[in-house]
Image (spheres, helix red, strand yellow):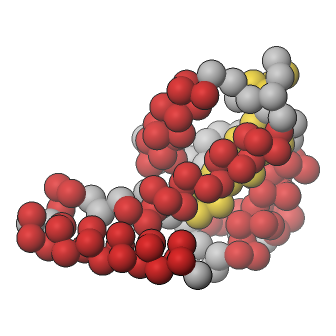
Amino acid sequence: MKVNGKRHYLWRAVDHEGEVLESCVTKRRDKRAASKFLKKAMRRHVIAEEIVTDRLPSYRADMRIVGCADKQRTGRWDNKRIENSHLPFRRRERAMLRFRRMRSLQMFAAVPSSVFNHFNQERGLSRRDHFKTNRAAALDEWRVLLAA
């Protein structure tokens, strides 16, 4: 990601269903940034049975320190769910053209993903009547959250 002409990195944690759990923006992509992101994600969410990452050596080094190096998996196609979670984000990013501050990128990454998680019903996996009732329930819950 480019913020005001300088490269920044977007870290995202995605669960097995494709929902975005955590996102973080850093200036570097090193062991310290990986450690910060992994600790933040593990503090907020339960430690996963397996952690799928790309082949960045920083992940392996940090997971050895944290003590979950045996849970890491790096395969050629294993990272596909995470990469596909970037697609809606990239679409919104193109519409905005660019970011000027790192904070605006962080807010942009965090808020819409939670909205997407709330309304994403996996249309192809259920019948139309179930989809409609689930979607209506999500919309009602969303309206209650906005009113409070």
Provide residue 129's location: percent of width, then percent of height. Answer: 9, 70
Is 138 placed left or right of 52 in the picture?
left
Q: Residue at x 65, y 40 (%)?
A: 55
Quarter holding the N terminus is top right
Provide residue 3's location: percent of width, then percent of height. Answer: 79, 27
Q: Residue at x 45, y 72 (%)?
A: 142
Q: Is residue 52 above or below residue 66?
A: above
Q: Residue at x 38, y 62 (%)?
A: 119
| Between 61 and 25, the one nearer to me in the picture | 25
- Rendering quarter of residue 126: bottom left
Q: Is residue 43 above or below residue 89?
A: below
Is 111 placed left or right of 66 in the picture?
left
Q: Residue at x 35, y 70 (%)?
A: 139
| Between 22 and 49, the one nearer to me in the picture | 22
Quarter holding the C terminus is bottom right
Residue 114 seen in this snapshot: yes
